[in-house]
Amino acid sequence: MTEQDRPIPHYFVRDGEAFAPSGLARNPWFANAVAGGPIAALIGQLVEEAGFDPALEICRLTIDILGVVPHVPLTPRIVPVRQGRQAQLHRIELLAGDRLVTQAHLLLARHLDTPPCPAPQPHPAPEEVEERSFLVGATMAGAIRTRPVLGEARKPGRGVVWLCMDGEVVLGTLASPFAKACLFADFGNGVGSATHAEQWSYANLDISIHFFRKPRGLWFLLDSFTEGAGNGHAVAQNIFADADGVYAKGTQTIFVAPGSGLPPHAAPAT
């Protein structure tokens, strides 16, 4: 097989109304499961394809992964929850057979021209940072490239990194900046972990992203750190930016448990 014949790295393949996960979507901790990042990216892809009112802006996306997601075709379902003139809320579900395995809530609000109050962006531009390896695993067979600014994947503490994804979420469909941003929103608990994975695991139970606007471009910055009270859970706090500035802020609820002794990953899956 020549390089031109080699398929683009991807997480899912369309299978009728369902999406069948590829090998790259596998959870690094469970071979028969799908990782949290690909799940978040698929949710982002579904949002882009849903055809919501273009006069509405995406304000918030929350994703709850309801246990280990099996490595089987996943069928989406979108349920309107609130259908107002100024705001709408939709629930996006992923089902494995007849079992609900992931649910997301998307909040939309009507676009209005209002005074901006942008978040500060103290980070260097992506072209100012050398491209080098940062992630340990979760690289999508090399399709995810990194330009680290601060921290290291195997060291606890705040991490800052520019990320670029050259693959596809769904084979044959160009991945949008929004879908890529949803993928990287799963990485915060690894990029900004609070301890070594061989000592304590930091699996995320949910993903919450509050958007100022939709992301743009090819490179996306993730600035993450984790805080907790030492009682079994913690909060990863994430800042998301592109070359034009900060586009979102978010959190992940982290379940803290004794480490399994497995090699630490920069983006541990749920």
Image: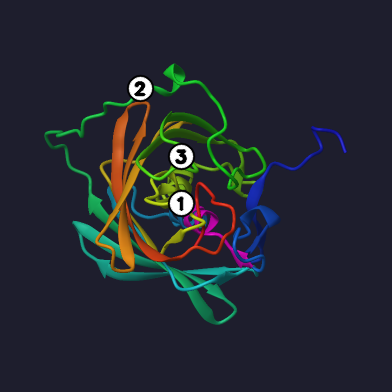
Are dots 2 and 3 in contact, CB under 8 Å? no
Choose between 14 and 137: the one closer to the eye. 137
Q: Which residue is mark 1?
A: 196
> From the viewer's perspective, is 197 left or right of 119?
right
Can residue 11 be seen in this snapshot? yes
Question: Residue 132: image x %, image y %?
Answer: 56, 27
N-terminal label among 1 and 2 = 2
Which type of secondary structure does the marked residue at label 2 adopt?
Answer: loop
Of the residues under marks 1 and 3, which one precedes in the sequence?
3
Q: How far separated are the C-alphas under marks 1 and 3?
A: 31 Å
Residue 207, image x and y in percent? 37, 58
Which residue corresponds to mark 3? 177
**Residue drawn at (11%, 34%), measured in percent from left and top?**
115
Q: Are marks 1 and 2 in contact (CB under 8 Å)?
A: no
**Image location of residue 256, percent across then percent down:** 39, 64
Q: Quadrant of residue 8?
A: top right
What secondary structure is the stretch in magenta mostly built from? Answer: helix
Which of the 4 image quadrants contains residue 249?
A: top left
Res. 55 visible in picture? no
Amino acid type for the residue under numbered disc 2: Pro
Q: Which mark sits nearer the N-terminus, 2 or 3?
A: 2
Residue drawn at x 49%, y 63% is 259
**In this orientation, which residue lies closer to the viewer: 210 or 127?**
127
Tag 2 residue: 124
The residue at the far bottom in this view is 98
